[in-house]
Image (spheres, rainbow, N blue to C red):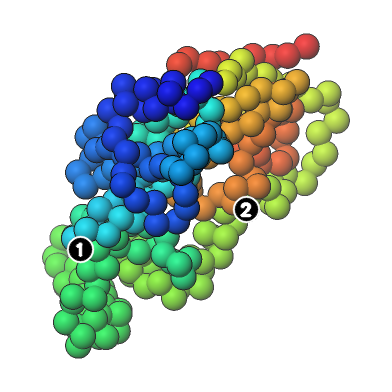
Amino acid sequence: MSVVQRKAMLKSEGFFPHKKNAKGTTIIYSRKHPTAKSVRVVIDSGIDSTTNKVVGKLGIKLCYVNRSKSWREISSQVFTTNTGLVKLIKAQEAAEKFVKSCKHCKAKKFTAKTGNVVCANACWTTWSGSKNATTNKTTKKVTQKTTRKKNATNANSPTTGQGQKGKVVKKAAKSSQKKSASNPKQSTAKRQRTYPLNKRVARSVNKKPQKKLQADILPGDLVTVEEILGDKVRENFTGKVLGIVQSIGMDSVKVTWTANTSGIEEYLLPQWRCYHISETVVDYRFKVLSRKVEYVIDS
Ligand SMILES: [Zn+2]
């Protein structure tokens, strides 16, 4: 397709060219996100600004314009040819929902050069120094104190029976666990959840022939991920993982993942439209979001 056609498509999708590209020689286009405040959909046109020739694919990403008007990339860039442009713009726009926001100033979070996911406004730099330095310590102390107080009050209350007391203690333990980041028990549990493929759930070996399930996944489908064991879905990652199917091989599925806040490593995400049911190994499968697709037994 010609440069003229590519430019016309971008224009018809509401995009306007920037005067400058700080990182390269191609023409950058952008426009507002249809719903999210301060978010822009940014497209690297792949058209060289000096030669006016197509030198690459179209690259689409989302940027958050922070308080000091700096643009922060809040989604990773995904690439497409002219034919996939409209769909991929939609997929990227949908990915905005999955970008975490700062709980202090509501700005979007992005991955800084350090690799840390931080507030796009860097609002922590405006907090008072003394408050910042003591926050962690005091939170912990306060938690312990209030926990003890709660138990004491409940034990003294005339209506508190044995059973209820137990309940309260449990609740208190739970809340302090939530608040303290250094709890060793909690971090172990999290690690197990993140790498469930390493985990053998049952000891017995299943000798029955394994059932094979298949879903009719197609290019352009918006997908997320489900964690499965046997024929049960253990967890649905809608809202945490989002991808768009680029192409289908024999049974392989090529996906561009536009969002993943699940903690599942990218190499563990599904790559096939079929799988064998296993009673012993936790696995991940695709779940199509953009239309109704069921898994059926494949013989
Ligand atoms: Zn903030």
Depth order, front residue of 50/90 = 50
From the viewer's perspective, tell me whether residue 285 is left or right of residue 33.
right
| Residue 236 in picture, x, y percent from top left | 48, 36
Above-or-below relation of 136 to 150? below
Q: What's the mark number on residue 30?
A: none
From the viewer's perspective, tell me whether residue 181 is left or right of residue 101.
right
Mark 2 or mark 1, which has the lower sequence index?
1
Query: At 54% from the left edge and 60% from the top edge, which residue is drawn?
Result: 189
Query: At 25% from the left edge and 53% from the top edge, which residue is drawn?
Result: 65
The amino acid type of the residue labelled 2 equals Tyr
Res. 96 in view: no
Depth order, front residue of 48/71 = 48
Specify the farthest residue to the left. 158
| Residue 71 in picture, x, y percent from top left | 30, 55
Res. 23 in view: yes
Depth order, front residue of 166/288 = 288
Above-or-below relation of 66 to 256? below
The amino acid type of the residue labelled 1 equals Ser
Specify the farthest residue to the top. 299
Q: Badge 2 is on which residue?
A: 195
Specify the farthest residue to the bottom. 130
| Residue 105 in picture, x, y percent from top left | 18, 60
In which image quadrant can residue 226 be found?
A: top right
| Residue 5 in picture, x, y percent from top left | 44, 21
Q: Badge 1 is on which residue?
A: 68
From the Cβ of disc 1, is ligand 1 less than 8 Å away?
Answer: no
Which class describes the residues within 10 Å of circle 2: few (<14), some (14-19), or many (20+)? Answer: some
Quote the CA–CA distance across marks 2 and 1: 39 Å
| Circle 1 SS class | loop
| Circle 2 SS class | loop
From the viewer's perspective, tell me whether residue 293 is left or right of residue 271.
left
Query: At 71% from the left edge and 41% from the top edge, which residue is drawn?
Result: 281
